[in-house]
Amino acid sequence: MKPVIALVGRPNVGKSTLFNRLTKSRDAIVADFAGLTRDRHYGDGRLGDREYIVVDTGGFEPDSSTGIVKEMAKQTRQAVAEADTVIFVLDVRNGLSGQDQDIARYLRQCNKRVLIAVNKAEGMQDSPLLAEFHELGMGEPHPISAAHGQGIRSLLEAALEGFETDEDDLLDAEEGDKPQVIRLAVAGRPNVGKSTLINTWLGEERLVAFDMPGTTRDAISVDFERNGQKFKLIDTAGLRRKGRVFEAIEKFSVVKTLQAIADANVVLLLLDATQGVTDQDAHIAGYILESGRAVVVAVNKWDAVDSYQREVLERQIQTRLAFLRFAPILHISALKRQGLGPLWKALADAYSSAYRKMTTPVLTRLIHEAVEHQQPKRAGTFRPKLRYAHQGGMNPPIVVIHGNSLEHVSEVYKRYLEGRIRDHYKLIGTPMRIEMRSSK
Ligand code: GDP
Ligand code: GDP
């Protein structure tokens, strides 16, 4: 699973600036899960082929007079609890303040790996001002400049140490073969019925919990089988092992949801028929789309709505989740165990779509036929020429088209091509990507 880095520190030390630096500002989609998290931001980042999630605990205002532990926002505590590494951000120009000492005291008792980032230290790699931060006794301070991009790489390398990409994962990806086990994540905001559905599926006694070896955290997943197909259900509920018991940090966890989506082959997005499609649903859907995972939408609590509400809901889904048009939409009742058979079929179909094998001759024929039927528009003196195509990846399927002047192919035309490829291969429930490679 993607490691999680939490940025902690008092206001104005440069956490947001560092967040943007670490995420390359891709947080627009994950922006804020409105109403769930007031002050936190989530973003994806990547160092080489190593991916991670960053959480900025922006709004945290410590109050020395009452003691940091009490006053530290619950949200920040959760971010720290869910993090693999905490980056404690300080401002070199201010030195160590009482508030910093309070935060340090809290972090020391959290049993987390904490890195000290001394920010605004542009051009100060060897400055005597840094010495003061050794006093914290939390390891060697990393002088950085979030604004100017100095010291970021070595800070990030330290943060990700021990979370190297799994060799086995890389092998799997290279072979491109379908994994034997479908990794399934059930995503949705609180109260849509995730636990009810999962319990219906599994029955308590069949729950098997595993520890993930080789990392400091304990992830929880459940293995089970349906119709001869093996599934691994990836936890999104924010559960952590605490000693010998599992502790729910919070019923809904954005970090766990993001990690589980990234770790899944197929995501089941659960909606609540009685609530309609909310902003939070749309945010989660947006993140799933961004991840490239296969997706099935299930509207739960179908038993609790009348035919008028059902119609309204259908229209809402068509407009608010228009960007998931490729996903099948099912109507279920987890409570009454209705619609679950078709749901299994949809999940398995989405999965096999995501891993569909497409050969170069067939793809090439498909694009030639598409061009015959409708040519790409001329751009000035250039007419894009599509020569051949091959498959560049799976989950999601990637089609790489080779030819000339392909940079002039419009988005509309790409969508037209995608439609023809989808039709031919019956791709349902998976996004797909088209990449253009011009040879001159
Ligand atoms: P936050 O409240 O901790 O999220 O802090 P911000 O990221 O909003 O930054 C607070 C102020 O510090 C802003 O005016 C930033 O431009 C400035 N700042 C952030 N990083 C640096 C840095 O590396 N060097 C300098 N000189 N200023 C910085
Ligand atoms: P979670 O927060 O997504 O895990 O949601 P829960 O599984 O805890 O369900 C929230 C509430 O919705 C509970 O009161 C459930 O009994 C109820 N619920 C779940 N599924 C259904 C359903 O299919 N129909 C109806 N009417 N209620 C449901």
Image (cartoon, rainbow, N blue to C red):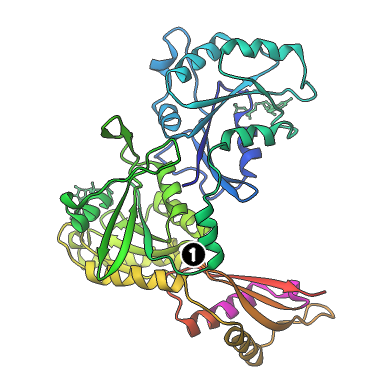
Q: Is residue 347 above or below residue 162?
A: below
Identify the residue position indicated by label 1 in the image: 323
Residue 286 located within the stretch drawn in magenta: no
The answer to whether residue 250 is left or right of residue 437 is left
Crowdedness near tag 1: few (<14), some (14–19) or many (≥20) residues, C-alpha within 10 Å: some
Query: Picture coordinates of residue 311 (x, y %)?
Result: 29, 68
| Residue 27 seen in render | no
In this rendering, position of residue 438 left or right of residue 419: right
x and y percentages locating residue 407 in the rendered image: 75, 71
Q: Looking at the picture, does residue 285 appear above or below residue 236?
A: below
Tell me the residue at 58%/80% (across/down). 416
Q: Which one is nearer the viewer's eye here, 186 or 413?
A: 186
Q: Quadrant of residue 147?
A: top right
In the image, is residue 11 above or below residue 353? above
In the orientation shown, which residue stands out farthest toward the right?
381
SS at mark 1 in the image: helix
The spot of residue 390 in percent (x, y) is 62, 78
- Image point 47% across, 61% down: which residue? 293
Residue at 51% across / 66% down in the picture? 396
Q: Please say whether residue 407 is one of the residues in the magenta stretch.
A: yes
Eyeballing the image, is 145 above or below 109?
Answer: below
Prevailing secondary structure class for the magenta stretch in the rendered image = helix
Residue 61 in picture, x, y percent from top left:
50, 20
At a point 49% along the width and 60% down the height, the residue shown is: 289
Answer with the quarter of the image where residue 309 lies.
Answer: bottom left
Residue extent of the magenta highlight: 404-419
Pick the residue in front: 116 or 284: 116
